[in-house]
Image (cartoon, grey):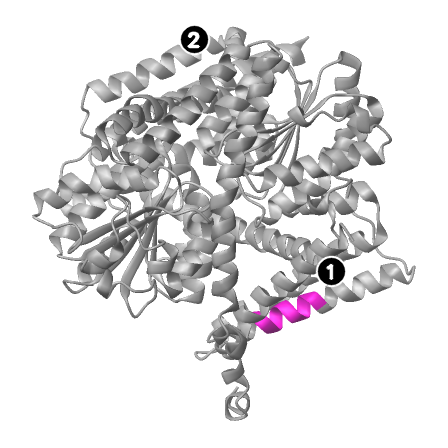
Amino acid sequence: MTFLAQAGVLGIFVEGNFAPFVMMLLFTIIVYVMIQRARAGLKIPEIRKLAGLDALDEAIGRATEMGRPVFTFPGLAGVTNPQTLAYFGLLGHVAKRSAQYDTRLIAGNVDPYVYPISEEIVRQAYLEAGRPDAFNPDDVRFVAYDQFPATAAILGIYRRERPAATILYGAFWAESMILVENAAQIGAISIGATANTHQMPFFVAGCDYALIGEEMYAASAYVSKEPVLTGTVVGQDWARIGVFALIIVGTILAQVQTTNWLKTILGK
Amino acid sequence: MKKELPMVLATIAALSVLLSQYFFAINQLGWLDSLDKVYNMMAALAIGLGLVNLTVVHSGYIRRKREHWWASVVLLVCLWGYTVLSLVLGNDHAFVDWFYQHLIVPADSTLYGMVSFFITVAAYRVFRVRTLEATILLASAVFVLLGTAPIGDVIVPGWSTARQWILDVPNTGGMRGIIIGTYLGAWATALRVMLGLERAHLGGAG
Amino acid sequence: MQALLKIDTRLIYLLTFVVVAVAVLATLGLPVRVTPPTKALYDFVEKLPAGTLVWVGMDYGPGSKSELDPQVVAFFHHVFKKDLKVVIHSMWTMGGKIGQELVEPIAAQYGKEYGRDWVNLGYKPGNETNLRLCTSSIKECAANVDHLGSSLDHLPLMQQARALDKNTFGLAITFNTGTPGIREYLAIVQAEKQLALADGTLQMSVPEDIPFFQSGQLVGMFPGVRGAAEYEVLVGVKGAAVKAADGQSLAALYVAILVILGNIGYLTARRAATAQ
């Protein structure tokens, strides 16, 4: 570290951001290598079965049989939240399937940024499914810009339109339990996914199928079966192993040394 | 072009933020501030967009006399009434404040209060001693629940200390594992967006 | 016994209402033990010199008032007692208004003047990007107006409070329920700007936020309504939190009893099924 400091390397970085940059770079390289392997047609591991995503087609199929709509909702976060980006990947798939099965899809939105993107995704999906005429812009809805007004609006949709499947996929807070319980009361299949740790127990307890933590980020790779996208998920797992190794080394060093060089480096 | 241009713009914006975050010289160029200002302006405009969307959608419902169309009338009256009142009289005017105090606060609190009813029923339905894992989950949940409320210490002195240990040690360990995994997943998603692999947000089936 | 497995949902709802109503109407006054996250926050504020600027994020809506308002009230009693100066900001539409109605009476009680001792910037759209903009210029992130629409140029405190950073502020705290909230503050205010940060959150979010207190990223926390009750005890004010903690006690006991009853029913049913 003294060498790095003398060489002026640390002056290049914003204070405290040298180690995060190196970590980010390493992670990016791992993911990039996995993408290249996938592109070259080399074998990459498959993503394990995710019941929540496998159940999507079943849920849409059930709605088709019952002649009732499918409802999707990305939670309260905006476009800058990765959970919302993961939702976009899923929404395209759900919209395409709904168009193919001729099932009505209602997509609720809270964020004024997320709303037009959702509308465009659904419109494109109907177009790609060869059913542009079936797309109804009124079914992609901006419900409210606040937590509980939005919850009330969605409960209204549940009671009036009685969706047969509810897909809650994104960042949720206190409204999750209300939405999940009410979905159960109208007899809808519920699929819940969130990376918000405080809401995971509610989804696991209340939903028919739940995806937690990083599982939800694998949606676009999982449903598209695209090897390049799968490569990024594999890269993510390798990075996880790396972080785990770092934690083990750090824990050992903290026990045997009074000055922990690893801690010093990571603090740079 | 319809997809490529937004993709390129997204990548440029993402790289500007990323590099400003890490490199001192780039940080000093003030790109982050400029981008933030643009985003702030767009956010303010987006609220207007939401207002227009709600108006268009619900005017359509009223025109077509769709089922429950009267609810759309109520919504539009409230939406525009409150907006105009706030703009004309000001945010803190007693009349505007009356609506806030007597409509928004009770309605919002009522909905939040409903959570307690649903959680109670869910706890009763879900927590069963079906397996060993379920039993451990049940026991720790009830332990933390009672330890969180002052009554825990009344039943057994020192209960809250034991509950704090559960929060500090096993809970923190588990949470950190989930948080690390979640952030790696989030970064992989961001990377897919930056590399143009994830295009769903540009429209289409992803 | 197996009937315990099928208690009518409506009866559970009704009893939930009765239990909470009893707790609100009658005061149990159960003793509240102070836990480490609340004590750490209290000690941190206690050590701040008079005149230090404190940034308060009011990042919640009316729905969470019952749990977060008592935290805000207890905190402001302490802050004004210590002669600290406060800038309030909100990333939630109703947050600015909630802040105004909570702080005004406490400020009056301690003889604090608006504009000189405290300022409410009100709701500012843009979520985390607005917060980031505040770290370089408060005037810009607030569009140079406060909650009431007055120009910041006319408020003496804002001559001192130029940017949300560690050179200007001694502490930042966000009373929050979701996004935007503590995560945005951790990334921008704590990690980037290295400003001391505290968290006022819902009971439900405590397991998620406590690792950040453990790691030292948070100097202290209000762990739910209990945290507010603990702070009231520490500051020596009588507020709504101690009463709310009573409600929490009865509700927790009620849920525990329900879980036990459900399991007695479940085990009885299982035994009967095995015997058959």
At 79% from the left and 56% from the top, the residue drawn is A231
Magenta stretch: residue A64 in it? no
Frontmost residue, B28 versus C250: B28
Amino acid bearing label 1:
Leu
Compared across the picture, whether C150 is left or right of C139 comes to left
Q: Amino acid at mark 2?
A: Leu
State the SS at label 2.
helix
Question: In what element is the residue under mark 1?
Answer: loop
Q: Is residue B134 above or below residue B162?
A: above
Magenta stretch, main secondary structure class: helix
Q: Is residue C101 left or right of residue C179?
A: left
The stretch in magenta equals A20-28
Q: Which residue is mark 1?
A: B195
Q: CA distance from mark 1 to mark 2?
A: 55 Å
Residue depicted at x 57% and y 48%: A81
Left or right: residue C215 versus residue B180 is left
Q: Are marks 1 and 2 in contact (CB under 8 Å)?
A: no
> Residue A206: x percent and y percent?
58, 26
Q: Which residue is mark 2?
A: C11
